[in-house]
Amino acid sequence: MMKVKIVSICILLLVGCSTTKLVSTWKNPDIVLFDAYKVLVVGMTQDENVQQIFETRLQEALSAKGVEAMRSIDVFDVEFTSSEKSEEELSAVEQQLLDKGFDAILFTKIIGTENRRTFKEKMNNISEMYTRFSADYLEHQDIYYNPEYYETFNIYRAETSLYCICVDKERELIWRGNIDVTEPVNMEKTIDSYIKLIKSKMGEEEVIF
């Protein structure tokens, strides 16, 4: 009975694990503290629903800290994001944002993906102690020939960067965070977890939050 309870607790812990994991952060060594007053939130993805949810949640998080924020979906028109832009065009966009009172851009995107594989463990036998090779082999022999013995899933490397577009200052990178995101089962919970993580790290490093 005790083994069953332990297994049950382990399952709950696994299910409750966050789908986001901080990999690294970088902060401009010339910046001690950075406060922004009007931020453009950009979530670069082809999935319009994910973009809307992400930008809205991050906008709300910034607003809760007293920072005015706007979503890129409310600033960029469809024509802007449907075609490739030149450096000159993007410089013009930055100037337009500056003229409208923006002083920072918080830019998030997926920069890579990795496929990983893990075992599909038979939970009813996980606490089994095999005393004979034959019993152990019989239980697990489908490793050889059953393609469903393994689960495959993707790890996405996301990157959030904070750029300054301040008046009379060089338009430069202030902060960057790299976060691994396990292929989400619940997209909204994953987005909330991601935003909570970047809020925490940026707050620790005295950047906006």
Image (cartoon, rainbow, N blue to C red):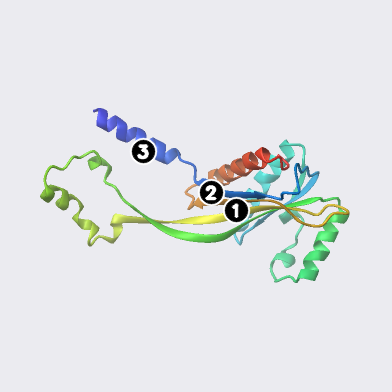
Q: Which mark is residue 187?
A: 2
**Residue at the location (11% across, 50% down)?**
134
Name the amino acid, label 1. Answer: Val
The x, y position of residue 40, in whole percent, is 75, 51
Identify the residue at the far front of this view: 29
Q: Is residue 147 left or right of residue 80?
A: left
Task: Please tell me which of labels 3 and 2 falls first in the chain.
Answer: 3
Pinpoint residue 179: horizontal percent, then vertical percent: 56, 50
| Depicted 40 relative to depicted 61: above or below | below
157 or 33: nearer the viewer: 33
* Residue holding disc 3: 11
Q: Nearer the viewer, residue 143 or 185?
A: 143
- Residue at x 35%, y 36% (from the top left corner): 10
Label 2 with label 1: CB-CB less than 8 Å? yes
Count how many numbered circles sit on residues in the image.
Answer: 3
In this rendering, which labeled residue sits more in front, label 3 or label 2? 3
Would you identify the image quadrant in which residue 200 lies?
Answer: top right
Is 116 left or right of 164, judged from the image as shown?
Answer: left
Q: Which residue is mark 1?
A: 50
- Distance, label 3 to label 2, CA atoms, is 21 Å
Amino acid on which disc 3 is placed: Ile
What is the quadrant of the C terminus in the image?
Answer: top right
Q: CA distance from mark 1 to mark 3?
A: 28 Å
Kind of residue at badge 2? Met
Dot 1 or dot 3: first in sequence order is 3
Residue in the image at 88% along x and 55% along y: 99
- Mark nearest the camera among 1 and 3 is 3
